[in-house]
Image: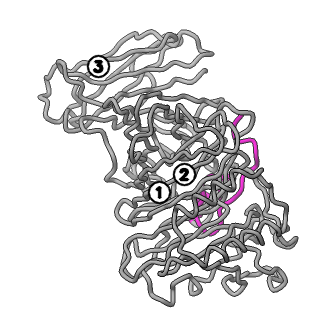
Amino acid sequence: MLFRDPPSSWTGSAGAGRALAADRRSPGVRPALAWRRSLCTLALLAGSTAAVAAAGKQRFDFEQLSEQARRLAQQPHRPAGSTLPEELKALDYDQYRDIRFRPERALWRGDKLPFEVMFFHLGKLQTEPVLINEIGADGRTRHIPFSRADFDYGKNRLAPETWGDVGFAGFRVHYPLNRSEYKDELVVFLGASYFRALGAGQHYGLSARGLAIDTVGGEREEFPRFKEFWIQRPAPDASALTVYALLDSPRATGAYQFELKPGAQTVVDVRSRLFLRAGVATLGVAPLTSMFMFGENQPDAGDFRPEVHDSDGLMVATGGGEWIWRPLVRPNRPLATSFAMRELRGFGLMQRDRAFSSYEDTEARYEQRPSTWIEPRGSWGPGRVELVQLPAPDEGHDNVVAYWVPEKLPAPGQPLELAYQMRWQGSEQQRPPGGWVSQTRTGRGFAALAPGERQFIVDFTGPSLAKLGPDAPVKAVVTAGPNGRIVERNAYRNAATGAWRMAVRVQQLQGAQPLELRAYLQHGNDILTETWSNIIPPQ
């Protein structure tokens, strides 16, 4: 089953999901997708602190972290008990938002380094403390303790002097991404294993996770969490920042290394080594989480905005050379589909439509939400890209998840090492080399549709199409699953835009069953475009 638990929230920075529709309007706060909430015990916190102190006597590296994850996997998972002060638990949403980190207290602010780090306070739904450490230039670590002096508590009447070192909820990294005189938010780690990043000129949109377990197929989805971080102190001329994280959950542990490289497209190189405690139904690697409410393929007549989404499609590149585009939808019931392959070249949740006129939202600025493209480093072997799409009442809720599922998993205790690169992209983004879908529209034209019929108008563009003459014999190759019958197909050049348009009418034979369509444009023996792979959900 999917996402049974109540949502946690992001505070001080845009979050992964959206439990409240109003939060979309504030770039500073957007609550996160549902995940399990467990609290660290004092004993566990003390034990981890002792481990940090011991580690501080030797140089810290990924192998040391991996050994810590391996040992942790050999022990039963220890759910933590609540140690959060009662007055923090009692804060309402607005009171929690009134607690803000003091920018002048940012880590490395006084040293005038290119990167700075600010921390999130615990409270409300952010109840799970994480340990945060700094790795010095000598490779040795020091624990960063909670300090009440780092925070402005606003109008709240609290007694932080009585709390001790309660830890942090997470942290955010700042860097002069858009202009040299101001350090913008670059990346946020907050809640479970969620994180998100920005390239220049982008607004927060979709999120990533370290790992997803049993999103589909198990009794209950499990949300692993990063329980401890190590942040490498950057050199004065550094253009990248390294963050390490220890992941833990009832059925898995993991060591993670993130190399953050800010720019027009911010690049995150990820190295992970996972250890299973027990078997899982679905291990979701490099998961991405996003929101789709409506678009040109699923319009909303009651909203003045033409489209509302953080991503408009899933793009997949297979090892066999096929590029696939699956337009996103908001289904009436949970809908899980997948693309199996022998080898993966890459996948991502993309925001292809970058025109303001497609959204007309002066606050949300959906045209500036990033696309995130994931490219494996080395071979991941056979498996599948899985896409889960959920109903959602409004744009305050994330309802799209995509991830890679390996065909074979290691035995409990054996390592699974996977490395990949994430690129957080804006207008310049990953595309197929030949031609790609620029829009998908649905609905009748002048002629009425028969019962059970659907019409799709799909525009393709790209260099393979641009070099063709207007009268080139381009063919639309369309296939339907067993629940569909192709009524009509056609392809022609759109003289108004120069793009090539495909028109397809299909009959859904059983309305209670989904229908899958695949189509691409062909000229002679040459396949010109990616494969448009569209799902019509059960009606």
Q: Which residue is mark 3?
A: 476
Q: Which residue is mark 1?
A: 365
Up-down: is 293 above or below 480? below
Q: CA distance from mark 1 to mark 3?
A: 34 Å
- Name the residue at 71% across, 50% down: 74
Magenta residues, as a range? 1-27
Q: Where's the N terminus, which quadrant?
A: top right
Q: Residues within 10 Å of mark 3 (few under 14, many from 20)?
A: some
Q: Depth check: 86 or 457 in front?
A: 86
Q: Quadrant of residue 164?
A: bottom right
Q: Depth check: 157 or 419 in front?
A: 419
Q: Mark 2 or mark 1, which has the lower sequence index?
A: 2
The label nearer to you, 1 versus 3, is 3
The label nearer to you, 2 versus 1, is 2
Label 3 element class: strand
Q: Is residue 290 visible?
A: no
Q: Which mark is residue 273?
A: 2
Q: Mark 2 or mark 3, which has the lower sequence index?
A: 2
- Specify whether 91 is left or right of 377: right
- Name the residue at 40% across, 59% down: 267
